[in-house]
Image (cartoon, helix red, strand yellow):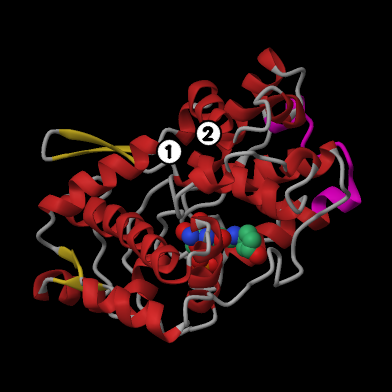
Amino acid sequence: MDEVRATSAWVAARSSHVTIDHSGIEKVVETVKTSIPKVEWDFEGIHYFDDGPLTVQYLFVLDTLNFCFWPDKDLNYDDLASGLKEALQNDKSVFDADRLQKYTGPELRKLLKWPRPLPLEDERVRLLREVGLELEKNFEGKASNLVDSCGKSAEKLVTLVTRHFPGFRDHSVYKGHQVFLYKRAQIFAADLWGAFKGKGYGEFNDIGEITIFADYIVPAVLRQLGVLKYSPALAATIEANVEIGSGSEEEVELRACSVCAVEKMRELIQKKSGKQVLSVELDIWLWSVGVQCPSLQHHRTLSIYY
Ligand SMILES: Nc1nc2c(c(CN[C@H]3C=C[C@H](O)[C@@H]3O)cn2[C@@H]2O[C@H](COP(=O)(O)O)[C@@H](O)[C@H]2O)c(=O)[nH]1
């Protein structure tokens, strides 16, 4: 995660379409009075939880598919989380490694009770296959074995996930420099930590190392809070709902500046209050604000990473 922090800061220092407004960060920190609103993981009550290995399998499948909902205006993350939960409640073997390798697009749709093709459906099916195959090959089919092998280190888990599952390698090249954002790999560690309340499969001694998860909601919230500023051209593109290319300078700047801005916010809260705040806690607060604001306009990029 040091790489995520360092390469995001590298982008933010050279960014032209997106800038971080330090006075905006100060205002936010002032407003929250150094204690950020506590938002419970699963505040929506939509996730599967049984306190055991099946929950780990569920969360891994969930985060394999946790990207790009916006092309269907009625689809959102909640539909995925609750759809997979119901599927698992009806059939405990639904996420077995051999079955993950066999789903077709229409079958996945049916599993989620979604009446139309899913956005990037072929990619979703390809990623499920990749996950099933690699789990079977190296982890006896169980995501819980993957988690067990990381010795309570979120950093090790992110490394293992990105090493074994290419679909989680959320990298870009910005001005000739490689940038690592690892949104889905990091959110998997955070989801374990949140679901298991920092115990058992969710115990990580280094949870503070994780950054926020650079998606399409958090940048929009940061902009609304005055923490991020967009160039007039980028603002007009987003307002007009024009797609932004995956890997474009604009897209990398939106995501990297979000990571960097929240790291600065975290440091400032710590400095002012002496209290340690986790980026994961800041993320869930910012994300929950964003998803509860239907008028929020976010950038649109077709991407399997977020
Ligand atoms: N930064 C960040 N991004 C997150 C999440 C989550 C869900 N986390 C769960 C874990 C505990 C909580 O209780 C949540 O239920 C999804 N996303 C991203 O949002 C986008 C979906 O938006 P919309 O189309 O409006 O549903 C999409 O890019 C998706 O990948 C998060 O926590 N942080």
Density class for disc 1 (Cα within 10 Å; few <14, some 14-19, many ≥20) is some
Q: What residue is shown with label 1?
A: 1
Check disc 2 and give the amino acid type. Glu
Q: Is residue 217 visible?
A: no
- Residue 164 screen position, x and y as percent: 54, 21
Stretch in magenta: 87-100
- Residue 30 screen position, x and y as percent: 39, 83
Q: Quadrant of ligand 1?
A: bottom right
- Residue 78 screen position, x and y as percent: 64, 66
Q: Which dot marks residue 155?
A: 2
Which residue is found at the position 43% from the left and 45% from the top? 305
User: Do callouts 2 and 1 mark residues in contact (Cβ within 8 Å)?
Assistant: yes
Check disc 1 and give the amino acid type. Met
Ligand 1 within 8 A of label 2's CB? no
Q: Is residue 251 visible?
A: yes
Query: Please, is residue 194 above or below residue 182 in the view?
Result: below
